[in-house]
Amino acid sequence: FGFGDPKSYSIMECAVDRLSKTGAVRHGAECFNYTFPQELDDEFLIISDALPGKIPWKYVGVKELQGFLRDRIEEGYTVPLNPKWIICDHGWKDLYDRLLASNKPYVQESLDVWYPPDSGVRETIEKMHCCHPDGFRRIGEEAHDTSVGKVEEQDETEEMDMEDVHFLLKKFIILQGVKRKLRARLLCMCLARTMPCAGGP
């Protein structure tokens, strides 16, 4: 099911179990697919009673979805965002920053689950965003510099293909695992020093 929180796991387990005959839901949400995230779709279905009119659903594009989510964040809702979207795709970093700045109940708690403060994920997101503020672009694509309203060609040396991104993500995940094991080993060593020996005086 990915790297979701306990509530998301239970929702997905129930959905997969209930809809197993139709195959409508086969895996967890893409926002928790940290191993090899897929490209975002061009169209999304929003189901909400906050939509205008009498119909509680609507198909929208990326910008309209981001606007809808921006409004929900202002109301105190929290939204899981895949780090790949924040780093690579235009507009998602703004939502991530709004979540970080929110002082609404539960928002910071959810962020601590999705992007643990001591994991280095938040720092990595910021570092990569500083290097590529317009996200990753394929060679030849134009990057939009929203700060000055210009369109400029991105330097080819700044380009990364999906294999490079996947390699860096894999390397990061392995490094985090090594750090966890090292911390656990050091903790065991410290505990062993403070405990009296079995059979000692």
Image: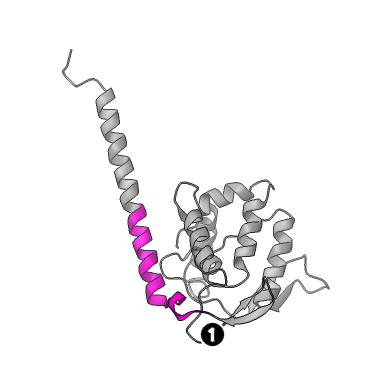
Q: Relative to 103, is 22 above or below?
A: below
Q: Quadrant of residue 168?
A: bottom left
Q: Quadrant of residue 67?
A: bottom right
Location of mark 1 (residue): 141
Q: Nearer the viewer, residue 201 or 46?
A: 201
Any magenta on residue 15?
A: no
Q: Residue at x 53, y 79 (%)?
A: 154
Q: Position of residue 133 (x, y in %)?
A: 56, 68
Q: Around disc 1, counting alpha carbons within 10 Å, would you say few (fewer than 14), some (14 to 19), or many (20 or more)? A: few
44 relative to 158 in the view: left or right: right
Any magenta on residue 157?
A: yes
Specify whether residue 181 is in view: yes
Q: Residue at x 37, y 60 (%)?
A: 172
Q: Position of residue 54 (x, y in %)?
A: 82, 73
Q: Relative to 196, is 71 above or below?
A: below
**Of helix, strand and loop, which one carries label 1?**
loop
Q: Nearer the viewer, residue 8 or 190?
A: 190
Q: Residue at x 52, y 59 (%)?
A: 126
Display coloring: one colour
In magenta, the rendered stretch is 154-176
198 relative to 58 in the view: left or right: left
Q: In which quadrant of the rendered image does the C terminus lie? A: top left
Q: Position of residue 8 (x, y in %)?
A: 54, 57
Specify whether residue 5 is in view: no
Query: Which amino acid, by three-letter code, is at mark 1?
Result: Glu
Q: Residue at x 51, y 79 (%)?
A: 137
Q: Position of residue 138 (x, y in %)?
A: 48, 82
Q: Main secondary structure of the magenta part?
A: helix
